[in-house]
Amino acid sequence: MTHDPQLARLGLFDARVPRYTSYPTAPHFGSDIGPPDFSRWIQSIPEGSAVSLYIHVPFCRRLCWFCACRTQGTTSDEPVIAYVETLKAELALLRAHLPRGVQLSRLHWGGGTPTLLSADQMRSLADTVFDVVPLAEDGEFSVEIDPNEIDDARLDALAAAGMNRASIGVQDFDPLIQKAIGREQSYQLTRDVAERIRARGIGSLNADILYGLPFQTGPRISDSVQKLLTLSPDRVALYGYAHVPWMSRRQQMIPSDAMPTPQERLSLFETARQLFLWDGYVEVGIDHFAKPEDGMARALMAGTLRRNFQGYTDDTAPVLIGLGASSISRFPQGFSQNASGTAQHTKAIRAGQFSTHKGHAFAGEDTLRARIIEALMCDFFVSRGELLRDFDVTPARLDALFQRAVAEFGDMVRVTDEGFYIPDRARPLTRMIARVFDAYDSEKAKHSSAV
């Protein structure tokens, strides 16, 4: 991938666009979706089908400055103990609405820092989850693990509960960069935790690393990536750090004058990308890499790669249920999001109802546009035949949608009898090209921060 001058001309270094982990994106959710909608959508899940479940634990012992997620710091165990009880009550509500025979294709604990739960809390929460909805025989149970907040007792508890995929946040191994972003985590500690995870028979390991961090240079990111490769992760997410101190107050601790330029960010990404490719990883979408034998790489080859709020996934379940404060659920009917604050969320659950406070019900061309955007984000191609087969759309309407992208991006996109393509040289523009198909986009959104 070269530094094509057209990338700058088309706004790659200036525009802020969504990550498109959903369509419409969360900022466009409205308050017209509430607990009755969530309850009805849960009840409409077919008996005996497979769903995904995400459990959000918003607490952290320390708040990393780079993070813009919905988290809250705590030095006490009391809020965590109370929150776990709320999750159990929410699971009981779910049981009351869930049709018979439903199983989990995926279970993911995210945060925040889910590994700040005690070993007993982990066992109890996992038991409650699987009592409500069991993990399918080929199901996947993954947990985000903070190497600074894990010990043997908690790893034993997770392994005994059935965790078969672990995810470790690395960000960067350079001590100067770690200090600048408020996330000090040595390579030795990270390597030790990875070895302890694998020693417990947990065969799949994910890792996250960031580019675009303060003080980051080509040699520094090369060093961090090569250290990460010694851990032999099965999947890697290479995320671009979004510096938005006007939105995330903790990011004001990060020196803005040490940030790489947009052109330098692209170079940092390309440096890391080449290292992963040289080590035999398969490039997945715009920012993931996987070993060829990993399920995500196989899904890419099979055309079944999907996009959700955690990024790319090989999970094809049509329903993703989010539990916990601020969690988002996806149904064939639309999206729903829980109350963001733990107090509001807990109040609703204690009153015997879900905490859904906003969302979006699909209408019009929503599902068509969602599929186009997802296909472009996953495969850089959307099949004309698939869209005509699966959606109520005419060839003329598809051509009109495709031609809007051609009018904006010219020869950086291609339209053929087979469908719509993003060539290799234009892949850095993928999110911008996908935005052309976003009916909820506006001039104001074009200058807002990424989500």
Image (tube, helix red, strand yellow):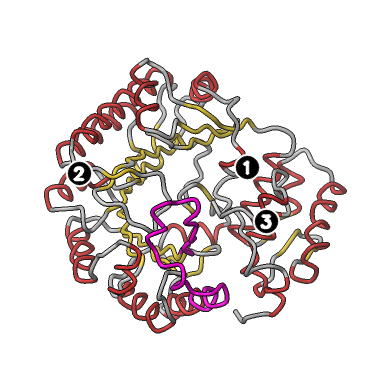
Span shown in magenta: 239-268
Give me the C-alpha separation between circle 1 and circle 3: 12 Å
Work out whether mark 1 precedes mark 3 in sequence or the reverse, and give the earlier one: 1
The residue pinned by badge 2 equals: 75
Q: Is label 2 in a helix, a strand or a loop?
A: loop
The residue pinned by badge 1 equals: 24
Q: Is label 3 in a helix, a strand or a loop?
A: helix
Classify residue 164 as left or right of residue 380: left
**Which residue is more in the foreground, 216 or 393?**
216
In the rendered image, residue 239, in percent from the top left (x then y), is placed at 46, 63
For mark 2, does the 10 Å Cα neighbourhood hold few (<14), some (14 to 19), or many (20 or more) residues? Answer: few
**The image quarter in which residue 116 lies:** top left
Rendered residue at 26%/55% (across/down):
146
Quadrant of the frame with the N terminus: bottom right
Observer-side mark, 1 or 2, equals 2
**Which residue is more in the foreground, 390 or 246?**
246
Q: Which amino acid does label 3 sit on?
A: Ala
Q: What residue type is labelled 1?
A: Pro
Outermost residue to the bottom: 219
Which labelled disc corresponds to residue 282? none
In the rendered image, residue 384, in percent from the top left (x then y), is placed at 76, 53
Give me the C-alpha separation between circle 1 and circle 2: 36 Å
The residue pinned by badge 3 equals: 434
